[in-house]
Image: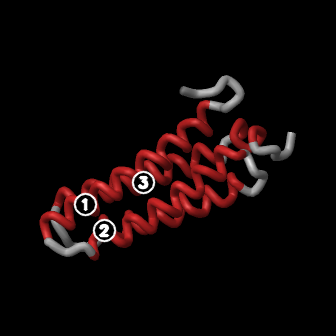
Amino acid sequence: MRRPDVPIEVFGALAIGAGAALVFVLEGLVLWQVESDPGWLRFPIIVAALELLAVGALLTRVRFARTFASAVFGLIGLVHLLATLNEGPVWLRVLSGLLSAVHVLALVLLNTRSALLHFGGRR
């Protein structure tokens, strides 16, 4: 449930960050079951922890949270883009492309004027 003092752009970035972390871990679980290799789960858990750390920083409204979350979302978006351009099953490449796109969307949402004002930027 969104609080009235949180702009919709910030709420959208929070939802994208938490949801994308969950989807990436689920993707790792599926690959673990298909390949019978638990190594497929290690990287998604590390990325999800980093992403949830960024979401937690956004929730606390620390001044540097927007910059940190923007950097994390941009970096993870690039990682998913590289997975999209790599070889592999089509479903994995499509899912990575979608995850890359939503991370770029979260990056754009965090750079709107209302998000900047919410985190104490210039008036």
Q: Amino acid at mark 1?
A: Leu
Helix, strand or loop at label 1? It is helix
Task: Note whether residue 75 is visible.
Answer: yes
Q: Amino acid at mark 2?
A: Leu
Residue closer to the observer: 84 or 25: 25
In the image, farthest residue toward the right: 123
Q: Amino acid at mark 3?
A: Ala
Going 20% across and 67% down the picture, which residue do you hit?
32
Helix, strand or loop at label 2? It is helix
The CA distance from mark 2 to mark 3 is 12 Å
Residue 110 location (% of width, % of height): 63, 46
Residue placed under numbered mark 2 in the picture: 41
Residue placed under numbered mark 1 in the picture: 29
CB under 8 Å between discs 2 and 3: no
Residue closer to the observer: 114 or 51: 51
Judge from the rendering whether residue 114 lies leftward or rightward of residue 108; answer left or right: right
